[in-house]
Image: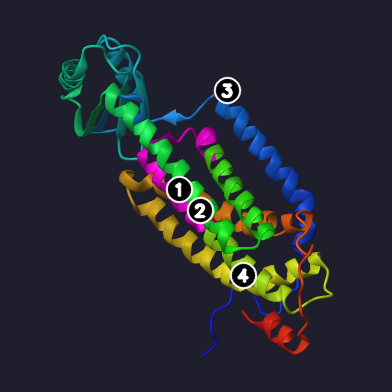
Amino acid sequence: MRLLRIIPDGTTFRFVRFRRYSYPISAFMSLATIALLLWHGLNFGIDFKGGTLIEMQAKAGAPNTAHVREVADRLGFGEAEVQEFGNAGGISLRFALQPGGEAAQTLVVQKTRAAFQGEYDFPRVESVGPRVSGELVQTGTLGVVLSVVAVLIYLWFRFEMQLAVAAIIGTLHDIMLTMGFFVITRAEFNLTSIAAILTIVGYSLNETVVVFDRTRELMRRYKKMSTEELLDLSVNSTLSRTAMTATSAFLSILALVIFGGRAIEGFAAVMLFGVVVCTYSAVFISSPILIYLGLRDGVAIEADDESSAKAATRP
């Protein structure tokens, strides 16, 4: 039985030459992300910002956003953030953290219920105090930093110096573009977002390690081949596996985005973007940078022409 292959065997596409386009594009997107982070910042959710989130579901018909905003502003808790979600009459209200501790947050919920209970149901109500939100910011940031450091240490011991540095750059590139996704789409950044970023780090590392393992294997067999040709051969020989992994992951996550519901919609959307970015990064960012890092410098390699032919055709 013939196995399904999205990419045919023996592909000889010259990926590395596209570094002249992929690097400026990625550099522009990374710099734009940094600028937007400094200018707009992230759309922190209740987890990190503190306050009260109330999701309402219209009992009949579509919600009147303007009317909801007008009534919410008259409640006396400051300007409320009002936003529709889904396509079944859902609307969310966000109130800033109120002075007065837990009793003040409870009062927000009580007054909101009293004002809207005739027209709306209340499937979700959340209140987070300043102490809890501050602790979540600290622990969430610390968790991401420690995870990235652990990945970098693993890469450093897993590969030779040039391969490790390239993998580190590729991983940081994927994190940066993912942050850009949050800034541009204004998607809520909460604890679920932290989980999505860490998952993307793992996926990015997996994609890069597969290509670099083949690169290191082929280095021992092709002594006279130029670095650019060697990298193209590495990417092409793993391209079928990369395409199958990315396609299966993309379709699975797409199903979660469409049918997963409100609870995991944000996580799934970030992961969908992450799969695309990590695949692009492994092919067009991490591998070509080895040219500039001097992959062949000081490396003693023995040629083995007979085994090299087998390596080149291995999926």
Compare residues 128 and 96 and report the one nearer the observer. 128
Residue 147 bears which disc, if any? 1
Name the residue located 50 percent from the left edge and 47 percent from the top edge.
148
Label 3 element class? helix
Mark pair 2, 3: CA separation: 30 Å
Residue 213: which numbered mark, if any?
Answer: 4
Residue 99 is left or right of residue 20, and the answer is left
Q: Quadrant of residue 237?
A: bottom right
Give the prevailing secondary structure in the magenta stretch. helix
Q: Three-letter amino acid code at disc 3? A: Trp
Q: Which mark is residue 89?
A: none
Q: Amino acid at mark 1?
A: Ser
Say if the magenta span includes residue 199.
yes
Which comes before the other along the chain, label 1 or label 4? Answer: 1
Residue drawn at 57 percent across, 23 percent down: 39
Distance, label 3 to label 1, CA atoms, is 27 Å
Residues shaded magenta? 181-204
Name the mark on residue 39.
3
Residue 297, percent across and down?
79, 62
Within 10 Å of disc 1 (Cα), the crowding (few <14, some 14-19, many 20+) is some
Figure coloring: rainbow
Q: Which mark is residue 151?
A: 2
Using the numbered discs, state the Cα–Cα distance from disc 1 to disc 4 in whole angstroms.
22 Å
